[in-house]
Image: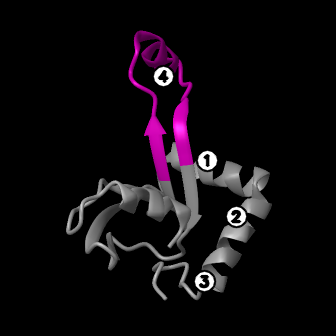
Amino acid sequence: MSSVMKEMASTIPVGGRGLPIRWCKGYLIMIHAFEPTPEVIRKELRGELHWRYAGISPFSNFTDTIEIPEGKITIPVFDVSEHPVYSHFVDFMEHFFPYEIEEAKKEASELGRNPNTGKA
């Protein structure tokens, strides 16, 4: 299971349903925004986005839910590949962090997990 999925699963009670996660161009994306203070809202209205956290994990094939057997957790997934912000984010990460992305793919493979499903 990727670090993004582990983080999500750690906050969900057993048998629960997690908050939706985004999928874009072969990656799961988890984003936490800053609280919407007047300053943050002003910047967003100018087109500036500032995220408190942004995680990305290889996940080749889109599926509308991810089932995590440990804890019987279901996480809905939304395909945001056509959204320019998320598409640009994935392009940015691939360009500036190629080593980290390849390491994440290797980690999934070494754990015997399918990067498409997170399952062994």
Position in image of residue 103 (x %, y %): 73, 69
Residue 61: x %, y % from top left: 48, 76
**Comes first in the chain, label 4 or label 2:** 4
Query: What's under tag 2, amino acid-wise?
Result: Ile
Which numbered disc covers residue 111? 3
Earlier along the polypeptide chain: callout 4 or callout 3? 4
Q: Nearer the viewer, residue 24 or 28?
A: 28
Q: Which residue is mark 1?
A: 88
Residue 36 lies in the magenta stretch: yes
Other residues around mark 2 within 10 Å, as few (<14) / some (14–19) / many (≥20): some
| Pointer 2 with pointer 1, Cβ within 8 A | no
Image coordinates for residue 81, horizontal then vertical, percent: 49, 58
Amino acid type at circle 4 is: Glu
Report which residue position mark 2 lands on.
Answer: 101
Q: Residues within 10 Å of mark 3 (few under 14, many from 20)?
A: few
* Residue 80 placement (x, y as % from top left): 43, 55
Distance from label 2 to label 1 (Cα)?
A: 16 Å
